[in-house]
Image: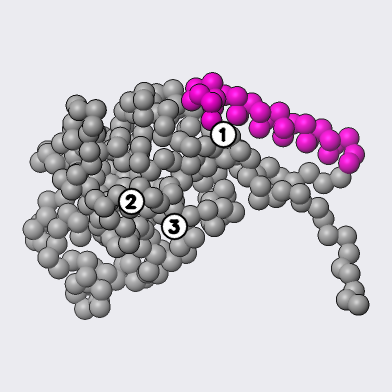
Amino acid sequence: MNKTFKITSEQFNIIYPVNINPLSGSIFKIRLFKYWPYSRIMELLIKKELVFVNPKLWKDPFEKLYLNTDYKELGLNQPKIYCFCVTTELKNEEAAWNIYKVNNERTLRCNINTNVLFEILSQFAYENNFKVYFGNANYKFTNKEIFNLQFPDNKYHKNYFSDFSIEKYLNVMTIKRQAFAYENELRIFMVSNKIENNNEDILRINIPEDKLQKLFSGFTIQPFDPVVGQDSVAKLESIKQEFEKKEIAKSIKLLYGETKVYTSSLYHNFEPIEKIYLSK
């Protein structure tokens, strides 16, 4: 592998209009974020690997409605696919902390260095005969409209199922219900160029040591519940929160090296409103 390995059109395809062109380099100017539970970040840093999952593991049944459909009459014997979802926006912060929360575990938002991520994926694709596709999640349809896409008399049917191809198949895999539009997801798919499919539902992509130390530009801990009052209980809670923040930051820096670890300022300087002032 050359040290000057470059991303080429043979590795990357846009499957849905995202207003960016990876070959011009503009893809690397967008910001990408990933919400992970604390234990998952520790696992990534220890094992040095990114995990892509087969969409069959997605929770929302509408997202995988067309995953295992028989497309042979449309000329496609779909391959096994794996996906990694990130978000391109921070305006969904409140909802994101809630939706990605796992039990009582702290969630962290990882600021991803887009250049480094796509270098890792491109190298893996080159060495393992994969191809990388990416596109924005499409939040255009309701539950019923997603289900009705299959019928020829549906006005969107031809958009998705005529001249069918792997790109069209993956395009269907970007559909999400309108209710999730706040997520602003970018979906990255890894597709094997090999005819045979394996039975694994998880694809583990090794992160080279030199890339790992550049993959993230910082980490943000979810906001802690605001502490109200000055009594002993409130003070003890404040001490516990500060201790937990420091422990999380220490463990990340121990594995990743010196980096920025923030705490979300969503509830910064929270104070209850005691009264409404009359206008003069």
Residue ID for mark 2: 27
Three-letter code, disc 3: Asn
Three-letter code, disc 1: Lys
Whole-angstrom CA distance, mark 3 to mark 1, is 24 Å
Q: For the residue labelled by badge 3, is the local secondary structure a helix, a strand or a loop?
A: loop
Report the number of discs: 3
Residue count near mark 2 (Cα–Cα under 10 Å), binned few <14, some 14–19, many ≥20: some
Residue count near mark 3 (Cα–Cα under 10 Å), binned few <14, some 14–19, many ≥20: some
Report x, y in % for residue 162: 15, 68
Residue numbers of the magenta segment: 230-259
In what quadrant of the picture does the C terminus appear? bottom right
Residue count near mark 1 (Cα–Cα under 10 Å), binned few <14, some 14–19, many ≥20: few
Residue ID for mark 3: 184
Q: Which residue is at 44% across, 57% downward?
A: 184
Whole-angstrom CA distance, mark 3 to mark 2, is 16 Å
Residue 103 can be seen in this image: no
Whole-angstrom CA distance, mark 2 to mark 1, is 24 Å
Can you say whether 280 is above or below 251 in the image? below
Q: Nearer the viewer, residue 179 or 14?
A: 14
Can you say whether 48 is above or below 198 in the image? above
User: Is there CB contact under 8 Å for labels 3 and 1?
Assistant: no
Disc 3 vs disc 1: which is toward the camera? Answer: 1
Can you say whether 97 is above or below 138 in the image? above
The circle on residue 203 is: none
Report x, y in % for residue 53: 33, 41
Q: Main secondary structure of the magenta part?
A: helix
Residue 236 can be seen in this image: yes
Q: Earlier in the sequence, mark 2 or mark 1?
A: 2
Three-letter code, disc 2: Ile
Residue ID for mark 1: 260
Report x, y in % for residue 193: 14, 41
